[in-house]
Amino acid sequence: KLGRTLPVKGRHRKTVIVHANSNVRRNPNIAKLQAGYLFPEINRIKMKHLEENPDAKIISLGIGDTTEPIPQPITKAMAAAAENLGTLDGYAQYGGYGAEQGQTLLREKLAERFYAEVNIQASDIFVSDGSKCDISRLQMMFGSNRRVAVQDPSYPAYVDSSVMIGNTEMYDHASKQYGKIVYLACSSENDFFPNLGLAKDAELIFFCSPNNPTGAAATRDQLIELVRHAKETGSIIIYDAAYAIYISNPNCPKTIFEIPGADECCIETCSFSKYAGFTGLRLGWTVVPDKLKFADGSLVKNDWNRLMCTSFNGASNIAQAGGMACLSDEGMNAMSELVSFYKENATILKNTFEEMGYAVYGGTDAPYVWVSFDGRDSWEVFTEVLTKCDIVVTPGSGFGPAGDGFIRCSAFGHRENILEAAQRLKESFSRS
Ligand code: PLP
């Protein structure tokens, strides 16, 4: 019998009939998660707004999805790779299952392009279907009951994947935090670099630079402090460099491995998603250096390799051909143009809010502009922006409790939409 009668606690005790069709207990960790994952939730609200206002010309500065086409030299290489799979020889060379760690040539090219000046070899680089997937697989590798610290605010996948794997206690509605996670507040008051003293017991620290959502890029000195902290406490930093290519400030490293000693305490994950518009194509990589060891002296890299071989069958060979093309001279130039375009969008948004009298952060080394609404509830601001301007932004509190009072505007958009959004915002939100 699969139906159940459950007592409901509270003042008015009553029973509800639960209609189940299996006897399988829900994963109690997944049951701890609050509402939906942030971005599907925003999409749901956007669709509802459209239903109620069918003529609304919605502009999305919300999810942070790329909008510009993948540059031609890259798409051409992928088209050729796809054609090649239709030939006997081509299939023999690149068809079928590839290496779980990625094609050797691509790993070598990644090492040459992004890690030539640091102590990282091609064999430390594991190609994947993207950083978000690797973040969850890293959780799987470390397993449950870890003490995790995250920047607050931060990319929601760190917290949600920590909850799912069993690294947290229940959600506390008062603090808006999950028990056991250490939330490291980052704000203009601490130059968006947290008090690491709060994380002295953390085993794993998720650190994202340039940061999503605040747009802050950590300086060399800050990263030296981060690495020193990890070495002193014996923790491992999971460094998310998904936006490293957006850094212009020469004082901000583009990889954590520029910091001496980082190869003994850091894993770095990165992605072609925001470099070349691969969000839907899916290609990324994670660096697990040879020197990084667990407490028992075994290599973290060996476990990562084992995990990838078990849970992943290698990135799409067509996507990898695209990755190779990104790393050619022509591809590097094309990526840099694409990134410059989005950065100009960021400048437009940043200037717009500044001219309107708001305190604005980010937007110079990242495609995100972080706007303060002086402590106002950020879902309320989100709703007001949607209702008055037909613009979707992201409420800061969706990235953690310290994000409340802010909205995040993404610079991923067609230029005419960014300009139109700037105009609409000026009409409804100017303070002067
Ligand atoms: N890391 C950060 C900080 C991100 O903002 C995102 C995507 O928005 C990702 C990782 C996910 O990247 P991917 O598309 O490679 O899964």
Image (cartoon, rainbow, N blue to C red):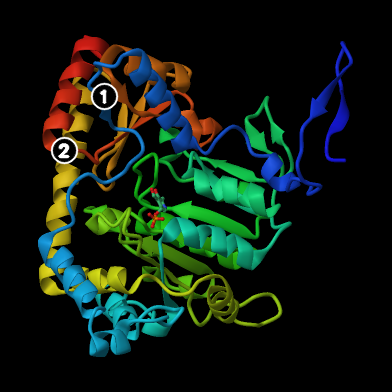
Q: Is residue 395 visible?
A: no
The residue to which callout 2 is attached is 414
Q: Residue at x 67, y 54 (%)?
A: 165
**What residue sits 48% from the left and 54% below the top?**
207
Looking at the image, residue 242 lies above or below residue 67: below
| Amino acid type at mark 1 | Ile
Residue 58, label in figure? 1
Give coordinates of residue 121: x percent, y percent.
38, 83
Q: Helix, strand or loop at disc 2?
A: loop
| Side of 335 where 149 appears, left or right | right
Say if 10 sits above or below 323 in the image: above
Quadrant of the image containing the C terminus = top left
Choose top left, top right, bottom left or bottom right for residue 316: bottom left
Q: Is residue 8 left or right of residue 52?
A: right
Q: CA distance from mark 1 to mark 2?
A: 13 Å
Crowding at dot 2, Cα within 10 Å, few <14 / some 14-19 / many 20+, comes out as some
